[in-house]
Image (spheres, rainbow, N blue to C red):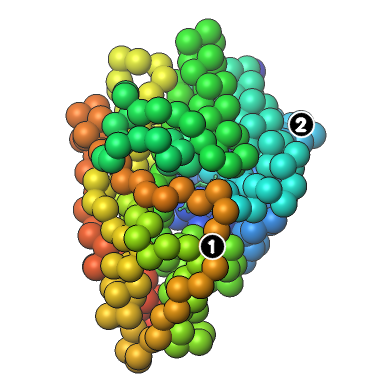
Amino acid sequence: MKGTDVMKTDLVTGAAGFIGAEIARELLKQGRQVVTIDNLSTGAEEHIPENVIFIKGDTFDKEVLEKLEKYNIENIYHIAGQSGGITSYDDPVYDMNSNIKSTLLLLDYAAEHKCQSFIYASSMAVYGDENQCPIIEETAIIKPNTFYGIGKMASENYMRIYAEQFGIKCTALRFCNIYGPGQNMENLRQGMVSIFMSQAIKNKHIHVMGSEKRFRDFVYIDDVVRACIMAADGKEKERFNVYSIATNRKTTVEELIRLIQKVMPFEVSVEYKGSTPGDQFGVYCSYELIKKNLGWTPKIDLQNGLAKMSGWALGDKQKGK
Ligand SMILES: NC(=O)c1ccc[n+]([C@@H]2O[C@H](COP(=O)([O-])OP(=O)(O)OC[C@H]3O[C@@H](n4cnc5c(N)ncnc54)[C@H](O)[C@@H]3O)[C@@H](O)[C@H]2O)c1
């Protein structure tokens, strides 16, 4: 059953956080009405873009989802979630509720309300450590190392069932490491770029836990937002699609640190000490599949992206975007 509000509306869960806020901002720019659900666990209310309708609560709470009844939700961008591998060990049951139960309830909502599309913030964490890089979706081994990765993997499978058996168009986007203006610079347990850049700015010193030879695939936030919206509008034949949101570029931790040092207007020292259990050693992914099906390619390389982000993080927030 559709809601009473006639305006076409998108639900973006987690718009008080980094990625959700940017998706919501872009949808508003395109003239859409946007509703968010956020429990403010890692996000902040002041981060929610102006004019987004805010429902405070957990995405795994049925009573909270009932507050969506009056809206005419077309697309669901399910972005909210416990968003860290290491932090998934703090409270695995919360992680499970936040990353699996929420997806299941929202898929159920989408089926009941005949929503057009369901876009999900999955993660390269589903891949684990046994793949050759660049990882290709169709042939990849799916063997997550963390509770977090298990949650993403389970959510993707619920989406597959809802697509196959209930006809909802579902797209899981396996994000690699996302960075850019708007990322939380206070949370030192989440986001490799934001952690290192924040240390560089605060202490002129970066403390790296884990090997400098680890490597990642860094994707700029604007490219991610574009991928999400293209996926919602996608006309693929399949009802269920999975894409890596990646650049197919390998960047070691050592290289990342050097690039951050380069964009800082002062000297930054670095020290390697300690380890991060459960951390994937190295991942970078092909983006051929989303390029073929939707025409998406990443546009901003790491050097330019870091320059934009540092401009923002050093205080000149206008220059950053
Ligand atoms: N940032 C990355 O590099 C990256 C990489 C892979 C996947 N992802 C996924 O993308 C999504 C967004 O990541 P982000 O970097 O914007 O994280 P974030 O922590 O900045 O944003 C998450 C938002 O969701 C909210 N939230 C968390 N659990 C909730 C719940 N159960 N109910 C309601 N609100 C809840 C938080 O308060 C926050 O505002 C997450 O699902 C994350 O797993 C992010």
Q: Mark 1 and 2 residues: CB-CB less than 8 Å, in contact?
A: no
Which numbered marker is on residue 62? 2
Q: Residue at x 24, y 58 (%)?
A: 300
Task: Tell me: 89 left or right of 175.
Answer: right
Q: Quadrant of residue 303?
A: bottom left
Farthest-out residue, bottom: 266
Tell me which label, 1 or 2, sits earlier in the chain.
Answer: 2
| The one of 21 and 153 positioned closer to us in this rendering | 153
Amino acid marked by disc 1: Ser
Task: Tell me: 21 left or right of 319.
Answer: right
Q: Residue at x 37, y 49 (%)?
A: 282
Amino acid marked by disc 2: Lys
Mark 1 → mark 2, Cα distance in angstroms: 39 Å
The reply to whether residue 308 is in sight is no
Front position among marks 1 and 2: 1
Residue 214: x %, y % from top left: 38, 57
Which quadrant of the rendered structure holds the C terminus? bottom left
Residue 151: x %, y % from top left: 60, 34
The reply to whether residue 43 is in sight is yes
Which quadrant of the rendered structure holds the N terminus? top right
Which numbered marker is on residue 275? 1
Vertical placement of residue 11 versus 184, above or below: above
Query: Does the Cβ of the disc 1 residue fall within 8 Å of ligand 1?
Result: no
Q: Quadrant of residue 257?
A: bottom left
Vertical placement of residue 291 versus 308, above or below: above
Q: Secondary structure at mark 2?
A: helix
Residue 106: x %, y % from top left: 62, 29
